[in-house]
Image (cartoon, rainbow, N blue to C red):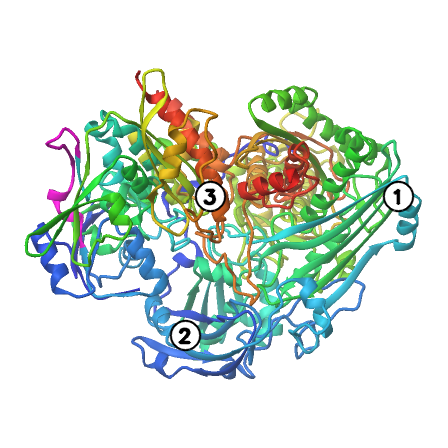
Amino acid sequence: MRITLTVNGDRVEQDVPPNVLLVDLLRDTCDLTGAKVGCDTGQCGTCVVRLGDRSVKSCQMLAVQADGAEVTTVEGLSGDGELTPLQEALWEEHGAQCGFCVPGMVMSLTDLLEHDSAPDEQAIRAGIAGNLCRCTGYGAVVRAVQKAVKDKS
Amino acid sequence: MELLDYTAPATLDEALEALRATPGARPMGGGHRLILDMKRRARRIPLLVDLGRLDELRGVRRGPDGGLEIGSTTTIADLVADPLVRGSHAGGLLADAAAAMPDAQVRNRATVGGAVVAGADVAAALIALEAGLHLRSGGARSRRVSVERLLAGEGPAGDEVIVAVEIPATTAQGAYERLAEPAALSSLCGVAVGVTFRPGGAVGACRVAVCGGPGPARRVPALEDAAAAAPGNGAEPRLDGVFESDDVASGEYRAHLARVLTRRAVTRARDRDPA
Amino acid sequence: MTTETFGAGLKDRDVPAMLRGDTTFTSDLRLPGMLHMEFVRSEHGHARIDGIDTAEARRMPGVVTVVTSEDLAGKLMPMPCIWIPGGVESHFPPHPYGVPGAGPVLAEGVVRFIGEPVAAVVAETAEQARAAARKVAVAYTPLAAVTTPRQALAEGAPQLHEAVPGNLNALWTCGDAERTDAAIAEAEVVVELDLYNQRTINNPMEPRAAIGDYDPVKDEYTLYATTQSPHNHRFLLSALVLGIPFNKLRVIAPPIGGSFGTKGYLYPDMPLVLLLARTLGRPVRWADTREGLMRSTVQGRDHLQHVTLAGTRDGRITALRCTSYANLGAYPSTIGPGVATALMGRSVTGPYAIPNAFCEVHAVFTNTVPLGAQRGSGRAEATTITERVLDLYAKEIGADPAEVRLRNMVPPDRFPYENGLGWTYDSGDYAAALRRALELADYSKLEVLRREARERGKLLGVGIGSFVAICGVGPSTRMQAEGMLGGTWESANVRVHPNGEVAATIGSTSTGQSHTTTFAQIVASELGIDPSAVTIFQADTQKAPYGQGTYGSRSYSVGGPALALAARQVIAKMRTAAAHFLGVPEDQVEYADGTFSVPGREGASKTFQDMAMALWYGWSLPPGMEPTLDVTTFFDPPDFNYPYGSHLAVVEIDETTGELEIVRYVAVHDVGPVGNPLVVNGQFEGSIAHGLGQALMERARYDETGALLTADLTTYAMPRAHDIPRFVMDTTETPSPHNPLGVKGAGEIATVPVTAAVANAVCDALREAGVRHLDMPYTPEKIWRAIREAKG
């Protein structure tokens, strides 16, 4: 099937079989390997990208479902290697260790902060309920979001 | 994952025709459950009919009787953010149930229609709210059935599509309580209540629906009777056979939780009662 | 050493790339012409293979080849096991070189666990390989299975390996059984406990992956793999599996997405992608799925234990005896048998001076996924049983559990302290760390909280986990005695470029511990320069000197000293040359802040950069001095190091539903000097969360046929952000005498006492309801049921 979508601002026109997952289209066709495949069943959140203005799990979506949509992956969050304030805060607070969950974590948190500019700790933790991290114990991630929120206000 | 074909019709009539024309075709809302099913069972589906592009099925509006009409492809995230929903008596209960879904990404994609068929937290809430469904199938056939009856086995048929969820106007207060298992974050046991309180706070009319375990969400009259009984007055509700056991929890524990969570939910609903 | 750099909380220099999604993990690599491999895994815990029909799979679109064990005969040897139970008789599957075998690359005639690879399919795309793998028809005759050590040891039990009579890999012991039994017989108080430390699945977020590449012109192989021991794996794969010259294999570990003890092992995919890359003439990639990981990557814990503690009425422990049944799984993993015996057994005295101790471990094969290490492995299992029985003892004699601990801890003046089971603790003030934890937890006021909780209908429990954890594996000769078939030193190279930039290369490999930052801090501090001038290279056998890898919290405490010693040799050489150029005796030259100077002689100085350039040119060097600054060192520590600490958990249990909440969690650690607090605290927090996972929810479950009932993340729970409380943490600092930096292992130690602290807290809370002991994981239904049963 022929689909046309925008990925990180670039128009992508591609023939895809109906059973191809969005995450595989991004990784294998668009060569954007930021989104990972960590579990296949929707629990780990390493595949989270943005579809329009909402975060989604790209391993739980067919590529054809994204026809006509605007997709943003972690690679498209900021231009020219700059970091967003959230990413800066994650760096400062050591919110990333091995880095495998990080792209998905960043995308979920970006979504959270766009829909809630000042989440409390409970809301931050709920906001990454769909992202598993085995390294940090989440504490540094929570502190980073709190820092990003504080720096903004 | 064997999926032979996919279509995303622009109108409901086209969608119904596609479902009618291809035996085994499946309608799809957000797609989480279908895609997981296909991955797991390597199930062969001849045609997926994506309802996601049917603008006519999306959105919330006020129904003729003052209740809510919710288009079936409205996402759960949009549902709980909708001003009409938030301003209604159903808002609190629906927000509770939506929050019980695993995560933001699921709420962002999952549709109200899909959540009904999934038969979990949101479906339990809708049963407690006495919600009905409007279904369409090919040839302009149309029927209405309650969420409760639908999940009890009355469809939907293969070529039927849920068009809208209809929540009657009510002044009952609702609340949802649950205990989740920690892996997939699904509810071990969830209890939705819709309660009309008498002046002074006693429980008047009450609807209780539960979810958790192998079966879909269902109404439990024994819990309604217990909730309506005066505090300390009345035996523990008998829930024999209401809950099944599986790898996650025993039916016995689920039944015990249902009793406890019903009390918690009624208390929460009372806290919401403006009177 | 300048303190500004060592000890500073510098940000991890690799994190920006991670945040941008630019970090290339193994599964993100794309080599030109790359093919994709998929395994056909066993569907049975134990079965005979009657036949494998690959015809239909071969006809599937894109399929290049399908291989089974028959195709590997004469090409790949079985994998070896290199850490065996030390000092005792042990039995292993065979290996043609006479070393302990760890099973074939693809199953030969029999499958012995649910994920064992039976065949491999190679196709043009991963999807095609997956589809074709489903078409490989394997005819099985199911065999009776055993999934627990007790079953496997029973008379008439099904036998897994011909070479392993009774499924017993080894009965391993340490300590003095006779004296211990005598002390128990004479004791005033004897407390016993049975405990099952359940099997867990490590589940790093990145599943394993491997890519094989072969250059026919040079006859050279390259393996890109998720390995935390590239050098070691190069040796084992080339010599013992592939049978090719050491010089012909290069192993590269791209950035690794977490390991926690699972990626230091040889797995079948590694030799197979190399062999197939050569025979097919194209690179071959394999990337595991989560389900594949859960069915085949080594699992953790799984000790069934019985412990007896003896003591006096006034709280002095006199003896400890532990018997453990360790479930090794179907095959010995590369280092599994050593982990399950020595690391557990020798650690059961914990931080206490116990005059009589004995431990025996029955290491047993069963039809389950092979056992390996999990963060804190061995030491966590030892700590849990000891700390639990110590609490029961305290309750038995009516004493405060904290007081009993303080009374029995090894006092600071007794180091080095031999624990009677084979470990010699290096240094510490164990009681000080516990006292600090009690203070931070406001221990004396917790009884008030307990009463308040009771009024709210909650049961409050307080639990302590005190520990000491052997780390820094290890002194090579000592490890030989422990059954390690290989050296356990570490190496480093420091090279100063002409402009003063420094390239430092280490033999260990980061799996998420910020090596490129923390090791740069060591070098910069030793060289007196800015860390930004130092680049760290790792994880490539062609770039790095030899190394052993990352495990047993050894990178920083064994590899770090190697690096520091190399840097010190660089400075020494520079000093000699500087004295020569300045025309003064060497002992008159001081080095500080990047400058060699002569006190009292204004203007007589040479900078670090001056000396770098001078040694690069090699002009007029002191007689006999070689040009350039390029130093390689090997550090083989004189003994292990022993970080320690105490955790304290306060839990509240809802008696009605069994729901559990951790309302306070305090952790105090002593890892010696902390090189980078940001990184080390991150290790602590992550480790505690990992331990909480086991305490609260994690459990690998098998049915009686060996089917894994928890083979994906919908059925195997791991902690999420809302499951983890905030931690109150602090450190004390006691340097280890066993390395020049004084540092101790820090990567996994904070996992060690978590299950102990939580188990003690839960059991403390449940005591009021009449429950003596409850095994992990503490799910609400289990707690609810325990309360109900205790109440009758």
Of the residues shown, which amino acid type is indicated by label 1?
Pro
Q: Earlier in the sequence, mark 1 or mark 2?
A: 2
The vertical placement of C65 against C425, above or below, is: below
Q: Quadrant of residue C17?
A: top left
Specify whether C383 is left or right of C723. Answer: right
The residue to which callout 1 is attached is C355
Tag nearer the camera, 1 or 2: 1
Marks 1, 3 in one chain: no
Q: Is residue C276 or residue B123 the one in the foreground?
A: B123
The residue to which callout 2 is attached is C121
- Chain at numbered mark 3: B
Of the residues shown, which amino acid type is indicated by label 3?
Arg
Q: Are marks 1 and 2 in contact (CB under 8 Å)?
A: no
Marks 2, 3 in one chain: no
Number of marks in picture: 3
- Is residue C502 visible in the rendered image? The answer is no
Provide residue C787's location: percent of width, then percent of height: 61, 38
Provide residue A103's location: percent of width, then percent of height: 38, 44
Specify whether C545 is left or right of C362. Answer: left
User: Which residue shows up at 10% across the image and 32% down it?
Assistant: B64
Provide residue C362's location: percent of width, then percent of height: 74, 61
Judging from the image, what secondary structure is the residue with disc 1 in?
loop
Which stretch is magenta? Answer: B50-68
The residue at the far left in this view is B139
The residue to which callout 3 is attached is B254
